[in-house]
Amino acid sequence: MTHHGIVRARDTGGNGSPLLLIHSLLVDPDLYATLTPLLIQRGFRCIIPELPLGSHSVPLKSGADLTPPGLARLLVDVLDALHLETVDIVGVDTGGALAQLLMASHRERVGRVVLTGCDAYDCFPPRSFRPIIKLMQLPGVLTILSQALRVPMIRALSTPRILTHKGTSDDVLVRWTAPLRQAAIRRDLRKVLSGMSPEYTLEAARLNRDFPRPVLVAWGDDARLFPSRLADQLLADLPHAAGVTLPDCAALAPLDQPQVLAEHIERHLRAVPQ
């Protein structure tokens, strides 16, 4: 339970180092379904909150603050509920933007960070998706979309190659799209979409120029949705950043390269400070 309602979270438990995995817009924790077992094998305790980003099963209270800072605060509430003081973080896509807000405004709760293919700087939302996001905010559009996504062919179009090379199963797409048929879920999503603005990621970037802990910038070699200039700028601005390129990988690295990503995450989180 949080200040704004119930947020379900998958917690693999155990005594391993806690790792918060933050998912992206219009998906749920299944985004990390292949990556999580690989991290468990490596001794990590994985916590994946089901954020109110359009594929969540339980709507939040109608007055919930779902601006980017509100979503970052919601993640802190989840950590409080689980009695976790400090966690390492993995963020992808929208989740990477929220990770940067945590680094900027709640850095006492943040250990090491992995950013992979995500919104940053002036890219929140990505420029190529801005017309779609504007459209989804119009009255009635999400209702029409929720019905159209009942059709398998249309569901398949929701994960284009710009997002993922490997794609995902239709069973998963059904789970990701079915919640949109609830009016309260659509309300939450509209609030999230209306709050997305580069002002938040630009301010986070400014504040994070003195972020004191190591950050791994792991970018797909075909992450066209998030241009490589974003990765280059993160590497230039974050004082303790290192970068790796993930081969045959678009924006959603947990889908395209879970094995490679797991190896890089382990190496980064286990590294002895210099």
Image (cartoon, helix red, strand yellow):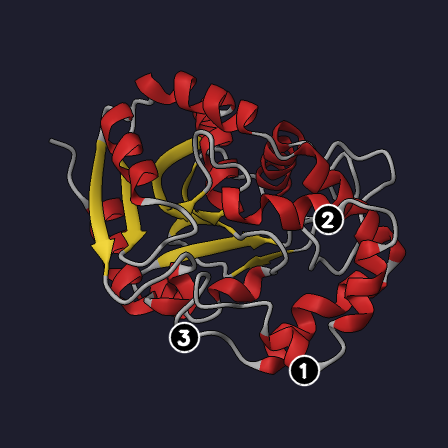
From the image, which quarter does the C terminus lie in? top left
Instruction: Name the N-terminal-most of marks 3 and 1.
Output: 1
In the picture, measured across the screen, residue 172 lies left or right of residue 102, that is right
Q: Nearer the viewer, residue 265 or 153?
A: 153
Q: Identity of the amino acid at label 1?
A: Pro
Direction left: furthest residue: 274
- Secondary structure beneath dot 3 equals loop
Residue placed at 23% from the left, 46% from the top?
A: 268
Residue matched to label 2: 135
Residue matched to label 1: 152
Q: CA distance from mark 3 to mark 2?
A: 27 Å
Residue matched to label 3: 166
Tell whether label 1 touches label 3 (CB within 8 Å). Answer: no
In the picture, measured across the screen, residue 131 lies left or right of residue 150, that is left
Where does the image place residue 115, in percent across and percent down from the top left? 37, 44
Instruction: Name the N-terminal-most of marks 2 and 1.
Output: 2
Residue placed at 33% from the left, 60% from the top?
A: 43
Q: Is residue 9 above or below residue 133?
A: below
| Residue 6 visible here | no
Q: CA distance from mark 2 to mark 1?
A: 22 Å
Tell whether label 2 touches label 3 (CB within 8 Å). Answer: no
Where does the image place residue 84, in percent across and percent down from the top left? 52, 39
Q: Identity of the amino acid at label 3?
A: Lys
Where does the image place residue 79, in percent across and percent down from the top left? 57, 39
Image quarter of residue 48: bottom right
Q: Is residue 176 above or below residue 266?
A: below
Q: CA distance from mark 3 to mark 1?
A: 17 Å
